[in-house]
Amino acid sequence: MTPHPTLRIIRDEHSALSAVLRSIGLLLSESRRHGGLPDFTVMRAMLFYIDEFPEKVHHTKETALLFPKLRERSAALAAVLDRLDADHATSHAAVRELEHDLLELEMMSDAADAETRRLRFEAKTHAYIASYLEHMRTEEIEVLPLAERVLTEADWAGLDSAFMQNRDPLTHREADDEFRPLFKKILMTLPSPLGLGPATQALHDSNDRRVS
């Protein structure tokens, strides 16, 4: 049975976001291991991606569209959905705070307390990553299977129509051109393979069109 587009899109977006989150952690760990500072440009690009797409589009549609449908059809995960909604309500502010903290780390890299600032930022970022990955894991193992069991074809038709409008540059072949530089910067940094083949191919296709 072919999965509903909504399920495929959510899982693809989770895969892309997981790759970005894990890469942020790797960048911090590698810079620490080599005794240098993290690549601030790449870190900014990755945090901006999280701010711009998962926070503004992905979470919004889960909270506004998917979760209410699930509540209508089943009370089985009411407490879980409440917790996930609470995560969604605070996560945008959390990534904005990390963006500010990264800027502070960069601007204050020569300050007397620079190492203390760096340790604080690293601990906060690793905690953020762990929390976000657990959030998505809960959605994958509890919420999406419930959706497959209880939602009706009419439910799916509305959800599919909404989720197919998503234009996440790491999962969608037709990502908006204005985000192409961000798209390229992140893709060229992520370790592979990370399940982002369609996105990588889209980048190559776009470059080929520009050349021709």
Image: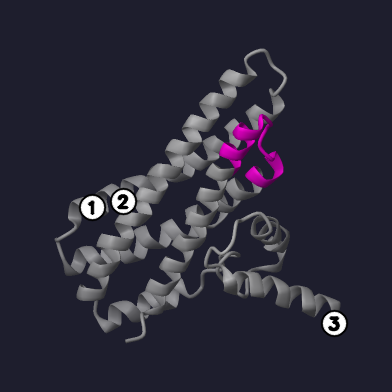
Q: Is mark 1 on a helix, strand or loop?
A: helix
Residue type at mark 2 is: Leu
Q: Main secondary structure of the magenta part?
A: helix
Disc 2 designates what residue?
Answer: 84
Q: Which of 115 and 171 is in front in this view?
A: 115
- The mark lying in front, picked from 3 and 1, is 3
Q: Do the residues labelled 2 and 1 touch (CB within 8 Å)?
A: yes
- The mark lying in front, picked from 3 and 2, is 3
Q: How crowded is mark 3: few (under 14 residues within 10 Å), some or many (20 or more)?
A: few
In reply to whether residue 37 is colored magenta, the answer given is yes
Give the magenta part as a residue range.
Answer: 27-43
Residue type at mark 1 is: Val
State which tag comes first along the sequence, 3 or 2: 2
In reply to whether residue 94 is colored magenta, the answer given is no
Q: Is mark 2 on a helix, strand or loop?
A: helix
Q: Distance between the residues labelled 3 and 2?
A: 46 Å
Residue type at mark 3 is: Ser
Farthest residue toward the right? 211
